């Protein structure tokens, strides 16, 4: 077992079983001993009462009227030792199956059983002997363990009264060693120890099986995570369990799928950036080359005619405007993506923004003889937003619609309730391009988009997001495109 978790689980299972067994064993031994002693007490009490009643019957049937009550016990016994009472007392230990003492009220031992190997005096008796005897002469049956030291063995003693003509004339003390109880406890402990050992072996086997089932999925997940860290995002755990481990494995598989998707997106983004850099380089190089060539011609005095010089100046101005537009697009996108960049939010009428946008785009639409129609369900649509940025957003979409529309076509701008639609009947967008048209640097490859930089729709999307506007697109090839703005 090289697994640290496996060793810990086996150790914890085994330690728990041992501690549990020890606690249960101690409780069992305590209760077993207590229960056994109670049973033995009950048996001793029954024997003692029967023996005491038998002695009382012998004494009541014996003619002892010549003795007074004070001397009835001793005189009755001494006078009848040769009779039935004597025989009974002689065999009393065997009858009782225990050691029997008979004591008078003054703690004088009338007879001593086989466990007493010498004649005991009053001073030899244990301290609680007088208490036991006194309780007996009061008519009570009582127990004591004080005789154990006196008899040199662990002993349970029961005292019960001997009566004659309803008078208590003696105390019967019945002693029983508790060696049998200890032996039974010892045997019970051995059985418990064997059970613990057997249970420990069984727990190790079961915990080993559990550990194997527990650690194998963890090893698979570990290997999967290592392969993921090395860039293999197609690897899976192949674990199917309906528990927490299964949930963790499923999460790792989900992570693998998302990392694979992210890897493809990253590669695609890298390609887009590479294309963007190439496009930007071209966009920058062309106007810079034109401006530089024009300036060199003017500075070198190659061009001297006023009209040609004027054309060169116009050309340099147009190229400068193109550079400015490109730089502004880059700055706008960078600012809008920065959450710390604040836009001027205030209450405004969106209908005014749409009308202003359509007026501004009119000069561009005239070049292709495209009519921009505007429809609205109400003249007032108050929202909270930045007038300039919203106008920029609609201008970008309308500019794209004009760029990809056919000559002499119509573009519809419709405002209905909380939604704005911009519809064209242009060439449409390919299905595989639709998910990416709002991505930075993405540029649809077509002759209409040769001069595009792939930033316009990304800027429009950022403006929509900053205004909590849901911007989506639906398009069909050769049928047209619809941009949908759902206002908050």
Image (spheres, grey):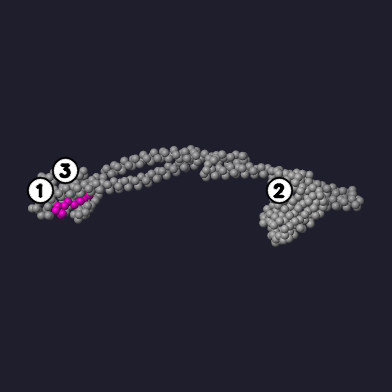
Q: Which residue sits furthest front? A: 377
Q: Nearer the viewer, mark 1 or mark 2?
A: 2
Comes first in the chain, label 3 or label 1: 1
> x, y (%) of residue 212?
49, 38
Q: Residue at x 9, y 50 (%)?
A: 63
In-image side of 136 versus 473 (left or right): left
Q: Secondary structure at mark 2?
A: strand
Q: Would residue 270 be visible to someone looking at this image?
A: no
Label 2, residues with CA under 10 Å away: few <14, some 14-19, many ≥20: some
The answer for how far apart the CA atoms under marks 3 and 1 are is: 17 Å
> x, y (%) of residue 134?
20, 55
Q: Residue at x 83, y 49 (%)?
A: 291
- The residue identified by callout 2 is 474
Looking at the image, which is closer to me, 40 or 320? 40
- The residue identified by callout 3 is 91
Residues at badges 1 and 2 in contact (C-beta under 8 Å)?
no
Residues at badges 3 and 1 in contact (C-beta under 8 Å)?
no
The answer for how far apart the CA atoms under marks 1 and 2 are is: 130 Å
Residues at badges 2 and 3 in contact (C-beta under 8 Å)?
no
Stretch of the chain drawn in magenta: 158-167
Q: Secondary structure at mark 3?
A: loop
Q: Secondary structure at mark 1?
A: helix
Main SS class of the magenta portion in the image: strand
Q: Would residue 406 be visible to someone looking at this image?
A: yes
Comes first in the chain, label 1 or label 2: 1
- The residue identified by callout 1 is 79
> x, y (%) of residue 14?
42, 42
In-image side of 130 versus 330 (left or right): left
Comes first in the chain, label 2 or label 3: 3
> The C terminus lies in which quarter of the figure?
bottom right
Q: Nearer the viewer, mark 2 or mark 3?
A: 2
Q: Residue at x 67, y 44 (%)?
A: 265
């Amino acid at each position: 077992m090289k697994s640290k978790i496996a060793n810990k689980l086996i150790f914890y299972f085994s330690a728990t079983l041992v501690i549990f067994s020890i606690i249960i064993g101690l409780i069992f031994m305590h209760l077993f001993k207590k229960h056994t002693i109670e049973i033995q007490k009950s048996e001793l009490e029954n024997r003692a009462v029967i023996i005491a009643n038998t002695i009382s019957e012998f004494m009541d049937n014996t003619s002892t009227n010549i003795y007074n009550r004070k001397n009835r016990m001793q005189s009755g016994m001494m006078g009848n030792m040769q009779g039935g009472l004597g025989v009974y007392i002689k065999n009393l230990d065997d009858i009782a199956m225990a050691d029997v003492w008979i004591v008078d009220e003054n703690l004088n031992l009338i007879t001593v059983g086989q466990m007493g190997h010498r004649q005991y005096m009053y001073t030899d008796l244990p301290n609680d002997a007088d208490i036991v005897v006194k309780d007996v002469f009061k008519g009570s049956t009582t127990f004591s363990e004080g005789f154990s030291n006196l008899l040199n063995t662990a002993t349970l003693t029961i005292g019960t009264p001997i009566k004659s003509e309803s008078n208590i004339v003696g105390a019967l003390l019945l002693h029983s060693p508790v060696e049998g109880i200890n032996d039974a406890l010892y045997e019970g402990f051995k059985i418990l120890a064997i059970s613990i050992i057997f249970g420990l072996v069984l727990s190790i086997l079961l915990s080993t099986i559990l550990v194997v089932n527990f650690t194998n999925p963890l090893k698979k997940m570990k290997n999967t995570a290592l392969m993921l860290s090395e860039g293999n995002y197609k690897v899976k755990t192949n674990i199917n369990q309906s528990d927490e481990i299964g949930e963790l494995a499923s999460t790792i598989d989900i992570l693998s799928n998302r990392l694979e998707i992210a890897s493809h997106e990253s590669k695609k983004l890298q390609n887009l950036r590479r294309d963007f850099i190439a496009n930007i380089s071209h966009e920058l190089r062309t106007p810079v080359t034109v401006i530089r060539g024009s300036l060199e011609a003017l500075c070198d005095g190659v061009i001297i005619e006023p009209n040609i010089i004027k054309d060169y100046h116009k050309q340099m101005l147009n190229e400068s405007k193109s550079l400015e537009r490109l730089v502004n697009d880059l700055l706008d996108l960078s600012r809008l993506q920065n959450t710390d960049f604040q836009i001027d939010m205030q209450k405004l009428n969106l209908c005014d923004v749409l009308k202003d946008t359509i007026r501004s785009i009119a000069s561009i639409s005239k070049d292709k003889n495209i009519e921009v129609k505007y429809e609205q369900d109400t003249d007032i649509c108050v929202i909270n937003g930045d007038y300039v940025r919203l106008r920029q957003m609609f201008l970008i979409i309308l500019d794209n619609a004009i760029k990809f529309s056919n000559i002499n076509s119509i573009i519809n701008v419709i405002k209905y309730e909380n939604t704005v639609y911009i519809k064209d009947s242009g060439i449409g967008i390919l299905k595989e391009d639709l998910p990416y048209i709002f991505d930075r640097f993405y540029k649809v490859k077509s002759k209409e988009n040769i001069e595009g930089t792939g930033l316009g729709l990304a800027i429009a999307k950022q403006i929509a997001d900053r205004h909590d506007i849901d911007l989506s697109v639906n398009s069909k090839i050769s049928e047209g495109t619809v941009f949908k703005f759902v206002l908050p």
